[in-house]
């Protein structure tokens, strides 16, 4: 179960709203959502939580690049919303690395038929059938669970927190404090921001 909320700082304090992520597919989409809620280009925080698994914070300050913190990268990597926050830059890998991996996997899935053997050998046909069965099973599993991803996606993602530990330091949430937050972290964050009451009104 997911919960997402948006906190926007104004001259009179914080404004809170619950956030629907159905139309959010990329980090750019999420950043645009935050910027649209910004008042005079002030700070906006987007909080995403998967119950008992992980939470993530996206911070947008005007036109500056978004800042991100994720409490458990490996858990988030198995989530469609978590993948939005886990950018190549955050994971320290070259942009497009996932595309290269997908291309290699596609090559492995080919049946291996040679140009001079149009029918292919029995062994290659058997290999093709096995590969096809495996691919079909994998696709079926993915279709049945929108948060499921292949092992290659999660294997390259480290366990534990990732991102900017000082993302809320100027609001009184130190790096140490952030690392100790687990489930329902938003309540403690809102308390530190002085936004507990406005948050409670939208929950």
Image (cartoon, grey):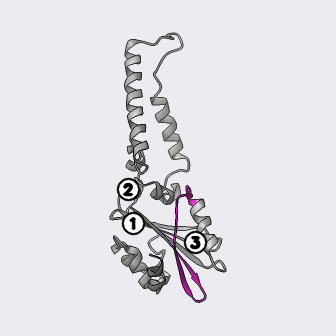
Labels 3 & 2 near each other (Cβ < 8 A): no
Mark sitting on residue 74: 2
Which of 182 and 64 lies nearest the eye of the viewer? 182
Residue under circle 3?
Answer: 60
**Which stretch did the figure color magenta?**
6-27
The answer to whether residue 135 is above or below residue 156 is above
Which residue: 61% across, 79% down?
42
Where is residue 196 drawn, in percent x and y?
44, 84
Return the x and y of residue 79 as percentages of the image width and height: 42, 55
Q: Residue at x 38, y 56 (%)?
A: 74
Verify CB contact (< 8 Å) between mark 3 and mark 1.
Answer: no
Give coordinates of residue 201: x percent, y percent: 47, 81
Q: Which mark is residue 26?
A: none
Q: Name the residue at 52% across, 36% down.
A: 103
Give the camera-side residue of 111 and 38.
38
C-alpha span from label 3 to label 1 = 18 Å
Query: How many neighbours does mark 2 have within 10 angstroms: few (below 14), some (14-19), or many (20 or more)?
Result: many
Describe the element under mark 3 as helix, strand or loop. strand
Label 2 secondary element:
helix
**Where is 65 relative to 140, above or below?**
below
Q: CA distance from mark 3 to mark 2?
A: 24 Å
Q: Which mark is residue 71?
A: 1
Dot 3 or dot 1, earlier in sequence: 3
Q: Is residue 152 above or below residue 25?
A: above
| Residue drawn at (56%, 56%) of the image | 26
Label total for image = 3
Asked whether 10 falls inside the magenta stretch, the response is yes
> Quick one: 120 or 191, which is closer to the camera?
191
Mark 2 to mark 1 CA distance (whole Å): 9 Å
- Report whether residue 25 is seen: yes
Report x, y in % for residue 15: 55, 81
Determine whether 75 is above or below 183 in the image.
above
């Amino acid at each position: 179960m997911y919960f997402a909320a948006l906190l926007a700082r104004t001259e009179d304090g914080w404004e809170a709203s619950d956030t629907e992520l159905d139309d959010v597919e990329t980090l750019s989409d999420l950043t645009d959502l935050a910027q649209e809620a910004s008042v005079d280009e002030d700070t906006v925080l987007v909080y995403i939580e998967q119950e008992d698994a992980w939470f993530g914070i996206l911070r947008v300050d005007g036109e500056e690049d978004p800042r991100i913190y994720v409490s458990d990268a490996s858990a988030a990597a198995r989530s469609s919303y978590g993948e939005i926050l886990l950018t190549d830059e955050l994971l320290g890998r070259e942009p497009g690395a996932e595309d290269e991996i997908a291309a290699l996997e596609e090559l492995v899935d080919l049946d291996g038929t040679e140009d001079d053997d149009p029918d292919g050998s029995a062994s290659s046909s058997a290999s093709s059938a096995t590969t096809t069965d495996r691919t079909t099973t994998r696709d079926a599993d993915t279709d049945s669970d929108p948060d499921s991803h292949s092992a290659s996606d999660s294997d390259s993602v480290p366990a534990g927190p990732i991102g900017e530990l000082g993302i809320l330091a100027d609001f009184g949430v130190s790096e140490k404090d952030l690392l100790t937050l687990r489930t329902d972290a938003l309540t403690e964050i809102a308390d530190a921001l002085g936004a507990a009451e406005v948050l409670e009104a939208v929950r």
